[in-house]
Image (cartoon, rainbow, N blue to C red):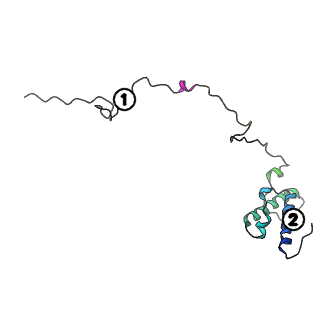
């Protein structure tokens, strides 16, 4: 497509839109692209730079005969001949369908947690009990004179 050389804002923004469309055709993902306003108004230059690196990586894969300088890293899913990992559908409950199966417990909880057969030891707050849970030791009897 022809590049517009006009000085008007809408003409320059049309050039930016054409660049973004060319990026899409070369395989740059939507998440890596920027909006026309990001570049034209200088609002989100980090995203613009990220798109340039993504474009450089896409060109390395889609135009392998290009012998010029390279920028960016080729995307893995395209670089491996389009062989992506198998995708799994996420459920609304936050899980992944078909990936994990629920395993039923092999033991019942009442076999795992057993009741205590002995009475609980008395604490120091109980009346007449000492700190060790033992009954209080009586004081020695006074010696006979």
Please identify the quadrant where the C terminus is shown. top left
| Horizontal relation, residue 23 to residue 130: left or right | right
Label 2 vs 1, first from the N-terminus: 2
| Horizontal relation, residue 110 to residue 119: left or right | right
49 or 91, which lies in front? Answer: 91
49 or 97, which lies in front? Answer: 97
Dot 1 corresponds to which residue? Answer: 121
Please identify the quadrant where the N terminus is shown. bottom right
Dot 2 corresponds to which residue? Answer: 18
Residue 93, horizontal then vertical, whole percent: 68, 40
Mark 2 Cα shell of 10 Å, populated few (<14), some (14-19), many (≥20): some
Q: Secondary structure at mark 1?
A: loop
Position of residue 131 relative to residue 49, above or below, is: above
110 or 55, which lies in front? Answer: 110
Magenta range? 108-114
Q: Residue at 83% of width from left, 51% of height from top?
A: 78
Q: Quadrant of residue 135?
A: top left
Q: Residue furthest top?
A: 117
Magenta stretch encompasses residue 132: no
Residue 8, horizontal then vertical, whole percent: 85, 75
Q: Label 2, label 1: how many angstroms apart (C-alpha)?
A: 82 Å
Residue 29, horizontal then vertical, whole percent: 81, 55
Q: Quadrant of residue 21?
A: bottom right
Q: Residue furthest left?
A: 145
């Amino acid at each position: 497509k022809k590049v517009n050389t006009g000085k008007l804002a809408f003409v320059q923004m049309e050039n930016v839109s054409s660049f973004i469309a060319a990026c899409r055709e070369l395989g740059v993902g939507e998440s890596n692209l920027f909006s026309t306003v990001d570049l034209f108004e200088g609002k989100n230059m980090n995203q613009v730079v990220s798109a340039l690196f993504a474009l450089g990586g896409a060109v390395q894969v889609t135009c392998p005969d290009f012998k010029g300088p390279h920028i960016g890293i080729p995307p893995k899913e395209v670089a491996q001949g389009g062989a992506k990992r198998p995708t799994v559908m996420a459920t609304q409950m936050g899980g992944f369908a078909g990936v994990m199966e629920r395993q039923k417990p092999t033991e019942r909880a009442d076999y795992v947690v057993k009741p205590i057969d002995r009475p609980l030891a008395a604490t120091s707050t109980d009346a007449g009990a000492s700190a060790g849970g033992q009954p209080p030791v009586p004081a020695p009897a006074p010696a006979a004179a």
